[in-house]
Amino acid sequence: MPDDKKLDPFKPQQPRIPGVPASASQAKPEGSPPPMGEHIPGQTESGIRRLWVPLVVAGVLIIVIAAFLRSRISSRESDQASLAPAAVTPPSPAAAPTSKNVENLPVAPGEVATTDELAKAWSARRFLFRNQATGELTPAMVVRLPGGEYWGFSLREAFGTCDLEYVTDLATLQTNYNFSADHPMVVDSCNHSVFDLLRYGTTPSGTLVRGEIEQGGAIRPPIAIEIREEGNEIRAVRME
């Protein structure tokens, strides 16, 4: 007799096999995938391990790359610092050299010595002569000659920048200038000229000036300075 339950044509009934329990016939075939959401022991742990391995490798790579980039940046900054121009420390101003032209000397026109200071023949005294027009100071000297006369002259050569020297050591004249003399001379170390204050020479204009050129390439005798004796004062009055 037909079954009272309506059969669903889309859900056919499983056939019943004599001797086989119905639960066994409904067992899932081996190897079939488990229903979604069904837990299979051991499968979840294996999947998690498979996910962690690439994550760990990626993390290690990121750390290595970051360290490499940091070292490259540090190296580049170090190279730039080494190539950068060093700060230049301005030199401290050097002390002005002590020059014969800036010594604490008498300044003329005016008194430049006393008769007591120049009591002996060939004694000398340095001083500075001020140009009244420009204010320039020129090194100069006054010498007492053997006859008691005083002669003044500029220690700056006439057509140059060298300073003349008053040499009293006769051996120095022989050694440095190959000149034999029996009294002090005035010399020009730039052109090795030797001037004799006991003799007169001529300037290019024909004027007679004390200080004949004995040797060397000088053009004229030293520039003369007029000297006057007033009491015990020796005064330089004017320059040639």
Image: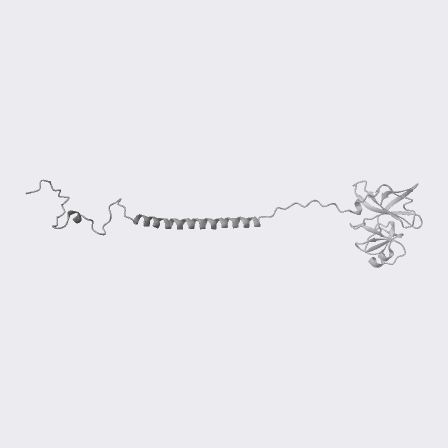
Q: How is the image coloured?
A: one colour
Measured as percent of width and height from the top left, residue 42 is found at 30, 49
In the rendered image, the residue lying farthest to the right is 147
Q: Quadrant of the C terminus?
A: top right
Measured as percent of width and height from the top left, residue 70 is found at 49, 48
Does residue 186 appear left or right of residue 67 in this picture?
A: right
Question: In front here: 38 or 129?
Answer: 38
Measured as percent of width and height from the top left, residue 12 is found at 14, 45
Measured as percent of width and height from the top left, residue 40 is found at 27, 48
Does residue 54 appear left or right of residue 21 in this picture?
A: right
Q: Residue at the location (82% across, 55% down)?
A: 193
Total tally of numbered discs in the picture: 0
Question: In front here: 152 or 72?
Answer: 72
Q: Quadrant of the N terminus?
A: top left
Q: Residue at the location (47% across, 49% down)?
A: 67
Task: Name the quadrant containing residue 4.
Answer: top left
Does residue 17 appear left or right of residue 236 in this picture?
A: left
